[in-house]
Amino acid sequence: MKVPARRLLSDALRHDLGLTGTHVGCEHGVCGACTILVDGAPTRACLMFAVSAAGYEITTVEGLARPDGSLGPVQQAFRECHGLQCGFCTPGFLTTITAGIAENPDPTEDEARDMVAGNLCRCTGYQNIVKAVGRAAEPGPGRGDRMTTKMFGAKVPRVEDDRLVRGTGRYVDDVALDALHVAVLRSPHAHARIVSIDVDAVLDVEGVHLVWTHEDLTGAMAEPLPLLIPHPTLTEGRTQYALAKDEVNYVGEAIAIVVAEDRYVAEDAIARIAVEFGSLPAVVGIEAARAAEHLVHDDVPGNVAATTEQSNGDAPAAIAAAPHTLSLDLDIERSACMPMEGRGTAARWDPDQNRLQVWTSTQTSTGVRAAIAARLGLDLGQVDVITPDVGGGFGVKIVHPWPEEPAGAAGRQDARPAGEVHRGPP
Ligand code: FES
Ligand code: FES
């Protein structure tokens, strides 16, 4: 097999060989989801070029089953001990533990914890994973006989676990589409004005089909995204645009997208977009927001989005009569959910059927469907949203739509002849 010199081993395995059991969570060597065995040693496939694998024996999760097709010992132990939920991190754990037990066939609990210390799981917690290490290291006979189909008083295997431990789950990046790829230019600033965006250097990049900034969006696509929960007390709710308009309000906010032949070309092109920012003060933390020395949004006085008062009975009289009173000033922490699978979106425009198909990693496919139809001016019946296996959500994937979802519908440009660079809506 021939691969370009800079192609990552993770991409070659997943997209060239179709071994999609090797998952990519961070692509920075941190999460461990992409761990494979290179001559038996656990290795991050996202940090290795495919050409560097020449001459080595590579084992992925697909190679962990027994020769007769039944689950391998670590896969079986994960199933028995409920060592997985969404299954996105699981292949990386399975390969790591397979190598760990080969080196240390009888690990203590501490050694089992050390064995998996370089792999992250957000759903399961590590207790059952550590248990599975011990179970996998037990002598073989009897393993696999611990589940039952009784529904009461016994552990029942989840139906999806067999395919998840085999690496045959189907997450959004596993959907095989011969599609163009979208890369997103994101804000490096927490708060800044966008003075100018120059995309000229992108227009002649071979393989680039389209570049969009906010000024290319029209109609509903140019409006702020809908508010997820328009609670009546939220008098100054603000939502972002699909692509930032005039200013950015957080690090990572989408500013521009490039659609290109492949992800490598798209990301190279993104790096050629020049944005001039005018720095604005970031308002960090509840105290700074309350002090309102600086405003998060110019049109939100005092940085107050909502005021909620609740009372029950005659509270002032009850407080006045109370022998003791206590005043509390509570800071409610913000929570940031970090599923191991990011928010991927794939889209295909079918010109014959006049329909848009969207695959997205969401917890609310009907909400995304309605939002995309509204944004793109399509009838609801023209849009299908398909949610394959989801690699963790924790609520963050309930938000609909994320900017990348309507922007990802730029896949409609598939119908456009290759090589034509297009600015403006489809
Ligand atoms: S370590 Fe490779 S994808 Fe996270
Ligand atoms: S099961 Fe580990 S991240 Fe979901």
Image (spheres, grey):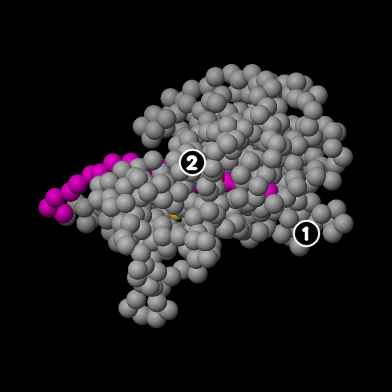
- Is 78 placed left or right of 181 in the picture? left
Q: Considering the image in quadrants, where does the N terminus appear?
A: top right
Residue at 70 percent across and 36 percent down: it is 2
Residue 42 in the image, given as x and y percentages of width and height: 44, 41
Name the residue carrying label 2.
39
Residue 129 position, x and y percent, is 36, 54
Q: Secondary structure at mark 2?
A: loop
Q: Position of residue 410 (x, y in %)?
A: 74, 43
Q: Residues within 10 Å of mark 2 (few under 14, many from 20)?
A: few
Can residue 300 be seen here? The reply is no
Mark drawn on residue 382: 1
Q: Secondary structure at mark 1?
A: helix
Dominant secondary structure, magenta: loop
- Callout 2–callout 1 Cβ contact below 8 Å: no
Does 267 appear above or below 312?
Answer: above
Residue 266 is covered by the magenta coloring: no
Q: Is residue 263 left or right of residue 320?
A: right
* Residue 343 part of the magenta segment: yes
Which mark's residue is nearer the viewer, 2 or 1?
Answer: 2
Residue type at mark 1: give it. Gln
Residues rendered magenta in the picture? 322-346
- Where on the picture, by quarter, is residue 32? top left
**Between discs 2 and 1, the one toward the N terminus:** 2
